[in-house]
Amino acid sequence: MRKIIYHVASTLDGYIAHKDGTTHGFLEEGEHVSDYLESLKEYDTVIMGRHTYEYGYNYGLLPGQPAYPHMMHYIFSRSLHFAQPHEQVKVIADNQIEFLKELKETTGSPIYLCGGGQFAGFLLGHKLIDELKIKLNPVLFGVGIKLFEGSGETYRLRELHSIAYKGGVFLLNYEIDYL
């Protein structure tokens, strides 16, 4: 079975973005960045919500096009539609949980859950996230988009490994134990 890995940057106070979706304040240079970019090669599939996908428009992503050329994209949204999406981009509007359960049963690499605190909270509530890779940045936002929105349960994490980078970023890798 394929794992879903939530691979995301976070502040020390648990935010993945400011309220407006921007991420200024995260350290954008250093070994942690090159390691992250290298790790993206391990994935052949990415899942994300509409807001995360549309955030890419700020960086030149065109609607309906893949953000990661080597990955199949599944965008989870009931309102997003593309006239002619690229063959690597599919919008999943209905039966989302069933779709993800079936996707996990397919052959391939781990599945990259790319950002989206609301979407991540939804998946966590359905016990679909298997692993966390948190790039913990030495910054506080105070308010913003939480790492997990709407998650009211308690989950135990089992450390797989961690890396301390120069500049204060930590990569924390955990497996989730669903109680």
Image (cartoon, grey):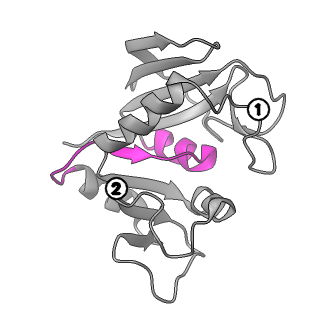
| Amino acid type, callout 2 | Leu
Residue at 40%, 72% (x, y): give it.
Answer: 90
- Which residue bears the numbered disc 1? 25
12 versus 106 height, above or below: above
Q: Height in image: 130 above or below 171?
A: below
Type of amino acid at the residue the image marks with label 1: Gly
Residue at 19 percent of width and 51 percent of height: 105
Give me the residue at 60% from left, 76% from top.
79
Q: Which residues are magenta?
A: 105-126
In the picture, the quarter occupied by the C terminus is top left
Query: x, y (%) of residue 103?
Result: 27, 56
The image shows residue 105, relative to residue 127, as above or below, that is below
Q: Position of residue 117 (x, y in %)?
A: 62, 43
Give the number of the disc on residue 100: 2
Which quadrant of the structure image shows residue 178?
A: top left
Q: Nearer the viewer, residue 155 or 65?
A: 65
C-alpha gap between disc 2 and disc 1:
32 Å
Q: Are marks 2 and 1 in contact (CB under 8 Å)?
A: no
| The one of 55 and 150 positioned closer to us in this rendering | 55
Q: Secondary structure at mark 2?
A: helix
Q: Secondary structure at mark 1?
A: loop
Q: What is the quadrant of residue 56 in the picture?
A: bottom right
Tell me the quarter of the picture where residue 99 sits.
Answer: bottom left
Callout 1 crowding tier (Cα within 10 Å): few <14, some 14–19, many ≥20: some
Q: Was residue 37 drawn as part of the magenta stretch in this picture? A: no
Q: Is residue 107 magenta?
A: yes
